[in-house]
Amino acid sequence: MPPVIDLNECIGCGKCVDVCSEDVFFGTKDFGKSIEHKPVVTYPEVCWHCNLCVKACPVAGAIRLRIPLAMSVAYKDGPLGNS
């Protein structure tokens, strides 16, 4: 399951694009020229759910990582909010 970008919260800084080693994100043609141009998730199938994009984002809640249920055991807070 890919990360989800909240386009209302995203400021278009591009930190998620820069930090992702798997190139899950892609900047649009005019990306970085103004805050209207936001990154998009282009290769969701290669996401490793490493959470770097969430941690690099300066706006809390602009990127949400959806952890597949089968992988949630490895995370402290799974998709169901379990600790």
Image: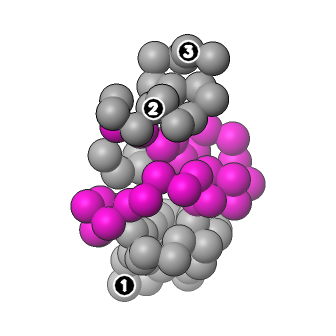
> Quick check: marks 1 and 3 in contact, CB under 8 Å?
no
Find residue 70 and report its horizontal and vertical position in percent. 33, 33
Place residue 71 in its image quadrant.
top left
Residue matched to label 2? 72
User: Count of labels shown?
Assistant: 3
Left or right side of 38 for 54: right
Q: Are marks 2 and 3 in contact (CB under 8 Å)?
A: yes
* Real-space Cα separation, disc 1 to disc 3, in angstroms: 40 Å
Q: Is residue 59 left or right of residue 44?
A: right
What whole-number distance in Å separates the C-alpha atoms at marks 2 and 3? 9 Å
Which residue carries the number 1 mark?
29
Magenta part, dominant SS? loop
Horizontal and vertical percent for residue 33?
A: 55, 81
Q: Which residues are magenta?
A: 42-68
Q: Amino acid at mark 2?
A: Ser
Residue that label 3 marks? 82
Characterize the local packing of mark 2: few (<14), some (14-19) or many (20 or more) Cα atoms within 10 angstroms.
Answer: some
Front residue of 52 and 36 = 52
Tag 3 secondary structure: loop
Q: Left of 3 or right of it: where is 54? A: right
Q: Residue at image x 45%, y 32%?
A: 72
Is residue 75 on the magenta stretch?
A: no
Q: CA distance from mark 1 to mark 2?
A: 35 Å
Which residue lies at the image location 54% right of the left edge and 56% below the top edge? 50
Reply above or below: 23 against 47: below
Q: Please rate how many residues cluster around mark 3, counting C-alpha atoms within 10 Å: few if below 14, some from 14 to 19, many from 20.
A: few
Question: Dividing the picture into quarters, in which one does residue 23 lie?
Answer: bottom left
